[in-house]
């Protein structure tokens, strides 16, 4: 076993609507960057889900960036959505 296999992935997600039923979550993931720095890194994540009635399944979209949610890149990332035909991919 390689020492890098021992690093855990820590995930913290929050339902921003609290008591209401929500299909979107936001949070942070801490992962080991084994490709570039060899250090732990933090990724900001938004998770969207969509129920596909015709397949009775759920599709999940993860949007990740090392930039905090206040950075301008999130204006573009927030525009990412499911295609109308996404449910036909199953």
Image (cartoon, helix red, strand yellow):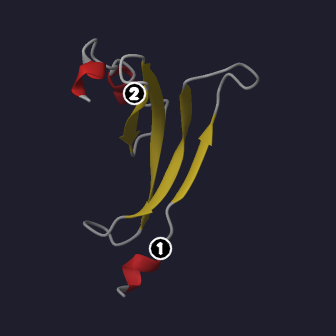
Q: Which residue is at the far bottom? A: 1
Q: Residues within 10 Å of mark 1 (few under 14, many from 20)?
A: few
Which quadrant holds residue 81? top left
Q: Whole-percent x and y of residue 83?
A: 27, 16
| Label 2 element class | helix
Q: Which residue is at the far top? A: 84
Residue in view at x 36 percent, y 17 percent: 54
> In which quadrant is the C terminus drawn?
top left
For marks 1 and 2 on the same chain, the one whose residue lies earlier in the sequence = 1
59 sits left or right of 20 in the view: left
**Residue, disc 1:** 7
Q: In front: 27, or 58?
A: 58
The reply to whether the C-beta atoms of the residues labelled 1 and 2 are less than 8 Å apart is no
> In which quadrant is the N terminus drawn?
bottom left
Q: In front: 18, or 40?
A: 18
1 sits left or right of 44 in the view: left
Q: In front: 1, or 7?
A: 1
Q: Whole-percent x and y of residue 27?
A: 56, 41
**Residue, disc 2:** 74
Q: How many marks?
A: 2
Q: Whole-percent x and y of residue 7?
A: 47, 73
Residue in view at x 55 percent, y 24 percent: 23
| Label 1 element class | loop
Q: What number is the disc on residue 17?
A: none
């Amino acid at each position: 076993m390689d020492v890098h296999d021992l690093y855990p992935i820590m995930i913290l997600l929050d339902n921003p609507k609290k008591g209401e039923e929500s299909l979107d979550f936001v949070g942070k993931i801490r992962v080991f960057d084994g490709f570039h720095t060899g250090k732990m890194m933090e990724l900001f994540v938004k998770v969207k889900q969509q129920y596909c009635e015709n397949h009775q399944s759920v599709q999940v979209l993860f949007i990740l960036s090392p930039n905090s949610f206040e950075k301008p890149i999130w204006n573009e990332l927030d525009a990412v959505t499911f295609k109308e035909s996404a449910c036909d991919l199953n």
